[in-house]
Image (tube, rainbow, N blue to C red):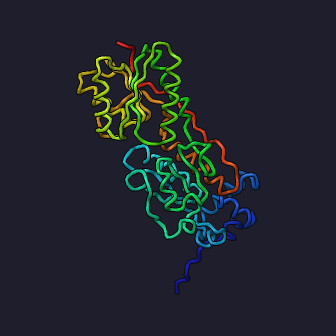
Amino acid sequence: MARASTRPTSRDVAQAAGVSQAAVSLVLGDKWRGRVSEATAQRVREAARTLGYRPNLAARNLRLGRTRTVLLVVPALTTEFFAGVYTGAARVASRHGFGVVLYPSPEGIGPARDPFASAQAALDGVIASSMAAEALTAIRGDQLPLVMLDSDPEGTTGAATVNLDIADGVRQVAGHLLALGHRRFLHLAADVASWTFEVRARELAARLRGAPGTSLRTTRSPISIKGAEAAAHAALSDPDRPTAVVCDDDQLAAGAYKAARRLGLRVPDDLSVTGHGRPGPGDGDRPGTDDRPPGRGTLRANAGMQALLAVLNGEQPSGTGIPVHLEVRGSTTRVP
């Protein structure tokens, strides 16, 4: 008669690694730093791998009073940026034994129906984009450990905020264009109430006020290529048209490209265009100057998940500010 196979236990791992069961729990629970050595942690992981040990997550979660599940609330998945946000959050979460439930807010922004009977019972914490903040009230996510992305650090009730250094990014873009001799600017602004866009507009105006002979015109547009094309076309049809366009979003920059083409303007020979990001694949337009770090959505989500994990462990989040750098790729040149 064949003997039923037995599932390896934490005691088996402890014996194979030559350590206590408490040490095994610390290592496999990712709480070993400062308690056991790196060599011991490595020995435990290798023993678990060799034995094929899998922790009983249900029992552990019940014991800890956690579901090890995090809700990620974003406006939509229609852009490369928010797809990167999910990828970054899921990657960090998986390394710590957490799962990520993705919840795009309907219509991009606004109230949303509760995806759970009780968010507090089903989730350990929430990461949310400021552009989907209104959805938090409906799902009661603001009553859970909360990390906000792209939000005013002084105005959020969350445990932490994770932001790019937006002000510095705008200053880099404006400085680059001013050095190229541009003095007539168009700010193609996102027609969305968002702390991120407000900071960007404020810093751009402040930077240009300090440069003699500059003018700044602001035109608002919905965040879509079609909407941006219409808004930019009207602004660029002015005889005293701007020589440089600063766009709030990658889709707005793509729309500005299309508007320039319709008017017979060449980018960058006749018009310099900058964006804060990169157009999504397949739109045929790639503005080449922006103030982003590589994988900006992924970076924010990485930092957001790290901050939330720190909060759940009773620690103070660190490194929630992300520096940016100017990447010049070819959509700007000196004034004609």
Count of numbered labels shown in the rendering: 0
**Rendered residue at 54%/37% (across/down):** 164
**Rendered residue at 37%/31% (across/down):** 219
- State whether residue 7 appears in this view: yes
Name the spot of residue 101 as percent of width and height, x first: 48, 60
Observer-nearest residue: 199 or 264?
Answer: 199
Q: Is residue 131 above or below residue 291?
A: below
Observer-nearest residue: 10 or 171?
Answer: 171
For residue 308, side relative to residue 134 (left or right) = right
* Residue 260 occupies quadrant: top left
For residue 286, side relative to residue 3 (left or right) = left
Name the spot of residue 314 as percent of width and height, x first: 70, 56
Observer-nearest residue: 308 or 207?
Answer: 207
- State whether residue 330 appears in this view: no
Q: Quadrant of the C terminus?
A: top left
For residue 38, side relative to residue 246 (left or right) = right
* Residue 256 occupies quadrant: top left
**Rendered residue at 62%/43% (across/down):** 154
- Residue farthest bottom in this picture: 1
Q: Is residue 336 above or below residue 44?
A: above
Name the spot of residue 317 as percent of width and height, x first: 66, 47
**Rendered residue at 32%/17% (across/down):** 240
Name the spot of residue 307 as percent of width and height, x first: 62, 49
Q: Is residue 294 above or below residue 212?
A: below
Q: Is residue 73 above or below residue 179?
A: below
* Residue 185 occupies quadrant: top left
